[in-house]
Image: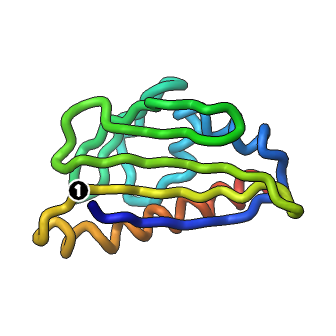
Amino acid sequence: MNTFQSTITINKSIAEVYNYLADMNNHQQLMTDDISDWTSTPDEASFNIRNMIKLSLKIEERTPDTVIRIIPAEKPPFELELKWELSANENGTEALFTITADLNMMMKMVASGPLQKLADEETANLAKLLA
């Protein structure tokens, strides 16, 4: 398994950050510009990653004010999990975003850069949106 992580501190309460992330409708605003054809409900989202793949994701686990775990709703080209872990700190909320993907050597060469970019951009966009 390959892991891609990004952490950010947001000057908002843990409840505000959790409530935002717990709704898949909000996740489009967190994505990179490489996303198209977005459709979503509070629990699921489908979209295309330009020139790569179509993904359908669903929230598998919501632990209030702590964890949001997102998994594929349909069979993806590789196993994938996205997880937001939240913790309170003196400046607000620390959000750790982790993408775990089971990539073969060829996919790792192609997808590692875009997946790390996605992790970094999602946390940066979350901080901007909740500033």
The number of numbered badges drawn on the structure is 1
Left or right: residue 114 compared with residue 117: left
Q: Which residue is mark 1?
A: 102
For the residue pair 100 and 40, the one nearer the viewer reads as 100
Quarter of the view holding residue 90? bottom right
The quadrant in which the C terminus is found is: bottom right
- Residue 3 percent location from the top left of the image: 37, 64
Applied colour scheme: rainbow
Left or right: residue 20 compared with residue 104: right
| Element carrying mark 1 | loop
- Residue 18 percent location from the top left of the image: 69, 39
What residue is drawn where x is 41% and y is 31%? 58
What residue is drawn where x is 53% and y is 65%? 121
> Would you call the spot at circle 1 few (<14 residues within 10 Å), some (14-19), or many (20 or more)?
some
- Residue 111 percent location from the top left of the image: 25, 67
What residue is drawn where x is 47% and y is 57%? 98
- Residue 125 percent location from the top left of the image: 62, 59
Position of residue 57 relative to residue 42, above or below, is below
Left or right: residue 79 compared with residue 63: left
The quadrant in which the N terminus is found is: bottom left
Which residue type carries mark 1? Asp
Position of residue 119 relative to residue 63, above or below, is below
